[in-house]
């Protein structure tokens, strides 16, 4: 369960130089934020930030933007960020439903979705980050050869996601329901949830979708 209320979290978001305020003003201009022309990769629903902070440290020539809806979760990533000596990572406290308001056409090179909220009730299917509705949004902001990478331990959500990729008119670059015992594991960066669920013996699913 996500933490919703940590005293001072919202104030920390507004005061931090690592959290971009009013991101709509940078639509189509994110390279100006990073002061370079490096590719931009984003993680939607970044949680406590272990995944994206690790990637930023490993890949200084890629710019990263982590998006998280809840201040009380993002504050944990911000604590990690403040100890890092990198210039290629910023955060947004933002609802991904409105992602078209903050990124221009073809502005993003890669989208990471890790252990997203499954929204298990059928009436909430459109809220799932791997729904065809979200893929329609990703289609607009991703560059021509861009891709979406998704990991989860939720088998039902993974089945839904595979179907969504097809319904959206995309194709599967790869997919597996047992990622940690697959040939695709090289270079994998674990998220907090991935460490937790895999240690419990839950198989991890992964797909990479392209247009």
Image: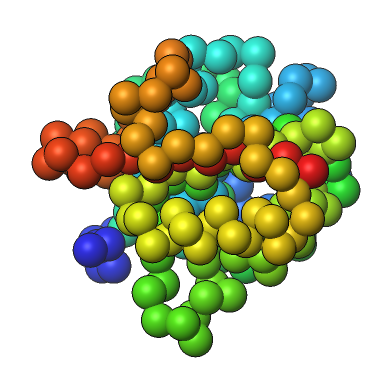
The percent position of residue 77, horizontal first and vertical second, equals: 36, 40
**Viewer can see residue 101:** yes
Examine the rendered structure and indicate whether residue 76 appears above or below residue 122: above
Extreme-left residue of the structure:
200
Residue at the image position 56 percent from the left and 14 percent from the top: 59
The percent position of residue 8, horizontal first and vertical second, equals: 29, 59
Q: Quadrant of residue 50?
A: top left
**Viewer can see residue 50:** no
The percent position of residue 110, horizontal first and vertical second, equals: 67, 35
The percent position of residue 31, horizontal first and vertical second, equals: 79, 31
Examine the rendered structure and indicate whether residue 187 appears above or below residue 108: above
Residue at the image position 35 percent from the left and 55 percent from the top: 155
Examine the rendered structure and indicate whether residue 183 appears above or below residue 170: above
In the image: residue 15, left or right of residue 203:
right
Considering depth in this image, is 205 or 127 the residue closer to the camera? 205
In the image: residue 74, left or right of residue 30:
left
């Amino acid at each position: 369960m996500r933490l919703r209320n940590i005293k001072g979290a919202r104030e920390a978001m507004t005061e931090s130089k690592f959290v971009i305020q009013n991101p709509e003003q940078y639509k189509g201009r994110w390279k100006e934020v990073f002061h370079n022309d490096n590719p931009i990769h984003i993680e939607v629903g970044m949680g406590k930030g272990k995944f994206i902070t690790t990637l930023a440290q490993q890949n200084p020539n890629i710019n990263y933007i982590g998006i998280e809806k809840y201040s009380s979760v993002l504050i944990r990533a911000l604590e990690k960020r403040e100890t890092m000596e990198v210039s290629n990572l910023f955060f947004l406290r933002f609802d991904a439903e409105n992602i078209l308001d903050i990124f221009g056409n073809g502005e993003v090179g890669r989208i990471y979705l890790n252990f997203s909220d499954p929204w298990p009730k059928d009436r909430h299917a459109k809220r799932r980050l791997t729904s065809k509705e979200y893929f329609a949004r990703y289609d607009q902001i991703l560059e021509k050869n861009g891709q979406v990478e998704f990991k989860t331990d939720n088998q039902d959500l993974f089945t839904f996601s595979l179907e969504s990729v097809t319904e959206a008119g995309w194709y599967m670059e790869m997919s597996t329901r047992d990622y940690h015992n697959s040939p695709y594991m090289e270079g994998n960066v674990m998220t907090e949830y991935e460490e937790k669920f895999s240690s419990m013996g839950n198989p991890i699913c992964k797909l990479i979708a392209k247009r």
